[in-house]
Image (spheres, rainbow, N blue to C red):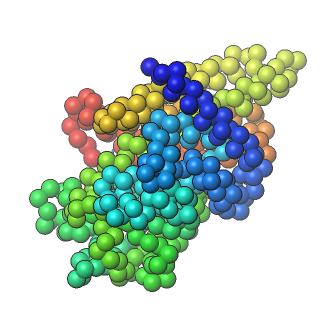
Amino acid sequence: MQTAEAKAAHDAIREGVARLCAQFPGSYWQELDRRRAYPEDFVSALSQAGYLSALIPEQYGGSGLNLTAAAVILQEIHRQGCSAAACHAQMYVMGTVLRHGSAEQKQQYLPGIAAGSLRLQAFAVTEPTSGTDTLSLRTTASREGDDYVLDGQKIWTSRAEHSDLMLLLARTSARDQVRSKTEGLSVFLIDLRELLGRGVSIRPIRTMMNHSTTEVFFDHVRIPGSALIGEEGQGFRYILSGMNAERILIAAECLGDAQWFLAKASAYARERVVFGQPIGANQGIQFPLARAFAHTMAAESIVYQAAGLYDQGLDPGIEANTAKLLAADASWEAGEACLQTHGGFGFAEEFDIERKFRETRLYQVAPISTNLVLCFLAERALGLPKSY
Ligand SMILES: Cc1cc2nc3c(=O)[nH]c(=O)nc-3n(C[C@H](O)[C@H](O)[C@H](O)COP(=O)(O)OP(=O)(O)OC[C@H]3O[C@@H](n4cnc5c(N)ncnc54)[C@H](O)[C@@H]3O)c2cc1C
């Protein structure tokens, strides 16, 4: 149960975010979408207002808020019709440095990330051959004296072209040389500004929505030993520890999308008159919207339950995965109902629906696909044999 104080604080966040978002109407996003361009002004405005540093402790210049407040920020951005996909990673990727980095690394990077002068938006885990099976990844980081040398390739590394730093998961020991298959991977914080053109190359991938995603190639790239975060070989554990937060925050974006679709569809259904009455008077229009509304409400309660458990320092794996599954389903259902409610106009760029429809579809696949969430729940919540 939320306290009155927390509710007032969240309402104030929502109002502030909504005011900021009002400066970035549909026409802004449509124009960027056409060019597949990065929403630089929107990201700068969010950074300057301090929203992207929500999770960074005050001692490093952040707002020191909890995950629940961060979820409120992202939900509101999406509820207003904007998209945080271009910058949400700036909020949470630093969590790995915060939890597992040395005191020097935190002091070196977190204040710049909090101020927005240093962008840590790229999170390179997925590879073309391993896909969801992260433990099969092949990019290597080989020790050479005090340095490491990187060789390999990542795919779907979003925002790499708009990031100063990148958090990278690479293999430091061969799979057959470690006791457990979860060992042998390590996390590095690398400075892309120094490495671009010096063994690191980035190739954009044009996708069905404007997402600034890329392939990143490492060709014998020398990085200092000081780029290692935490203990060598323990990187998979560090990445896993950040996944609950990521799932909860993405789920919050899905909630915002669902609410945007439902508001847009209801407004249209009240106004659009066909056969002499508003289309919203027909149960064929009402029911899909009402059903999506109910599913969104249910998803919202589990998203904030998961966030609350996370904020208590617990490990809400089942709740975070359930939240991601239900919220992504709710936004897709609401998007489908919204498009159908608009008939032909749903396909017109100027209504923003087709764009949001493409954007929210991603969350059935990334950052974790629906099937893999179900695999996890089957195993962890139901005690069924592990299938992945
Ligand atoms: C636009 C975009 C942005 C992304 N951004 C990032 C990023 O910034 N950083 C990053 O590291 N990654 C990123 N990803 C990668 C994303 O996390 C993966 O695409 C996702 O985890 C699925 O992996 P895959 O595409 O390799 O699919 P695969 O692992 O090849 O799976 C293909 C299909 O098979 C299903 N499947 C696989 N195994 C099983 C199983 N055991 N049981 C049932 N079904 C199964 C999956 O659910 C999926 O539907 C991004 C992806 C996209 C499309």
27 sits left or right of 103 in the view: right
Identify the residue at the far left of this view.
179
Q: From the viewer's perspective, is residue 102 above or below residue 324? A: below
227 sits left or right of 35 in the view: left
Image quadrant holding the N terminus, namely: top left
Residue 319 visible, this angle: no
Q: From the viewer's perspective, is residue 333 above or below residue 51? A: above
Image coords of residue 208 (percent x, y): 61, 55
Image coords of residue 373 (percent x, y): 37, 39
125 sits left or right of 160 in the view: left
Identify the residue at the far right of this view.
276
Q: Nearer the viewer, residue 222 or 326?
A: 222
How many numbered marks have been drawn onto this rendered protein structure?
Answer: 0
Identify which residue is drawn at 66% across, 34% down. 15
Q: Nearer the viewer, residue 289 or 251?
A: 251
Image coords of residue 325 (percent x, y): 44, 35
Q: Quadrant of residue 371?
A: top left
Q: From the viewer's perspective, is residue 161 above or below residue 72? A: below
Identify which residue is drawn at 60% across, 29% down. 11
Identify which residue is drawn at 44% across, 72% down. 191
Q: Nearer the viewer, residue 179 or 104?
A: 104
Q: From the viewer's perspective, is residue 383 above or below residue 166? A: above
Residue 94 visible, this angle: yes
Identify which residue is drawn at 38% across, 66% down. 189
Image coords of residue 129 (percent x, y): 36, 64
Q: Nearer the viewer, residue 179 or 309?
A: 309
